[in-house]
Image: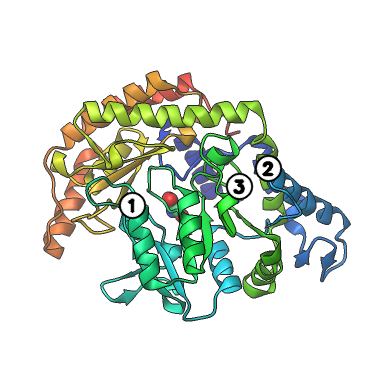
Amino acid sequence: MNQNLKSLIAQEEKRQAETLMMIPSENYTYPEVRAAVGSVLMHKYAEGQPNKRYYQGMGIVDRIEQYCEDQALKAFKLNPKKWGVNVQAYSGTPANLAIYNALLEPGDRILSMYLSDGGHLSHGWEYGGKKITSSAKTYKVSFYHVDPKTGVLNYAEIEKEAKKFRPKLLISGGTAYPREIKHFEMGRIAKEVGAYYLADVSHEAGLIAGGVNKSPFAYSDVVMMTTHKTLRGPRAALIFARSKLMPLIDASIFPGFQGGPHLHSIAGIAIALEKSQTAGFEKYAKQVIKNAKTLSAELQKYGFKVISGGTDKHLVLVDLRNKRTTGWHVAWALEVAGIVTNRNTIPNDTGSPYYPSGLRLGTPAITVRGMKEREMKQIAKWVSDVVERVGTQKVPEDDEQRRKTLKKFKADIVKDKFLLEIRSEVKKLCKKFPIDLS
Ligand code: DSN
């Protein structure tokens, strides 16, 4: 291996060990999962489904894929007579595209959550009259919103919107909605307008498997989840569907969208699913939520405005506008302090997706390290201290001035003694809660 590449991997390992990974969609997987993903399984091609392939040498990998499917149905307590699962999707966006391709014709209608309110790009995104994603180009997409005052979904409004728009597919879920989705309501609305209901629970998958967020299955036609967030598996996705829809889903994944499945990832998913059925995982999932709730409450004590007033999940979304700063400035300064979050749009954002007004923080990875409420209080204090240090900031409108000002801000903060002191405290905390990345 090129020595520089080797060193870069080692540096990334160190970064992950010595900083607080607080991007809600990130997590540390298990050493066994990393071993499976790096195993000889990646040498094998296996287009098709178990026992129905287009290649030879399939006996062993058929058993692996079948085992993964069994574990998926077991982990989410599904009756194999009523539900099936496809474990081959490479990740969340290709999985969603394959679902649309299975259930819809080009030009059919999708109703999904507006991106800045917490939705996801792959649910169809168009902005200012421009169709940004391929799903928006292929299908006719409309969006529902959170209540502008509460930041929470109003199901009566979604119902009105659905009756007006008449979608063929209603989607819930996304990246930054901190509250539990009422799947019962979404399923009811979908039925009423004759639409399929797709619950995208990519963020909550582990919380559902751990029994601390409600299961969407009873009310859904299709459920999609990525496997690398709260579920702690490798980067991939699972598509669950009612048995009658399964042949459409399987055919849409292969040959519709993908070639050979990544058997190494499938083995990794199976391991994560096994682990998600243990008492230890249930305890982990509970702690993820306790930590997020504590973080949210503590941040509010420091005067932060938390979207929806709190969280039911693993993430906290903060509106920074009352602090007279931006998500861009705060996320960069926090990184210098060793706290890795992401800037994020918020409902009714007055900024842009690249320079948004919000900050998204998550607890899945720091909870894997064993951190609890006490550490959340300390982290909230550090976040507050960093925001105070950043002070009043805005993003200049003029291109040239913006480029210069932001470049200078980044150059100055990496030398800021106050932020670097917090970084060394963060490093000490990380040492107290080690993570095995060897
Ligand atoms: N980009 C992921 C997230 O951060 O939520 C979702 O795809």
For marks 3 and 2, the one nearer the N-term is: 2
In what element is the residue under mark 3?
A: loop
Residue 369 in the figure: left or right of residue 388: right
Label 3 close to label 1 by CB (< 8 Å): no
Residue 148 in the figure: left or right of residue 209: left
Task: Give the x, y percent position of residue 407.
Answer: 20, 52
Above or below 358: residue 287: above
Q: Residue at x 37, y 37 (%)?
A: 311
Above or below 171: residue 310: above
Disc 3: CA contacts within 10 A as few (<14), some (14-19) or many (>=20): many
Above or below 94: residue 32: above
Residue wearing tag 2: 77
Task: Give the x, y percent position of residue 83.
Answer: 70, 55
Q: Residue at x 64, y 74 (%)?
A: 256
Which label is found at residue 373?
A: none
Residue wearing tag 1: 154
Which label is found at residue 234?
A: 3
* Eye-nearest disc, 3 or 1: 1
Q: Quadrant of the C terminus?
A: top right
Residue 345 in the figure: left or right of residue 212: left
In whole angstroms, how far apart are the C-alphas of marks 1 and 2? 29 Å
Residue 319 in the figure: left or right of residue 283: left
Near-viewer residue (214 or 127)? 214
Label 1 close to label 2 by CB (< 8 Å): no
For marks 1 and 2, the one nearer the N-term is: 2
* Eye-nearest disc, 3 or 2: 2
Q: Residue at x 73, y 44 (%)?
A: 71
For marks 3 and 1, the one nearer the N-term is: 1
Q: Amino acid at mark 1?
A: Asn
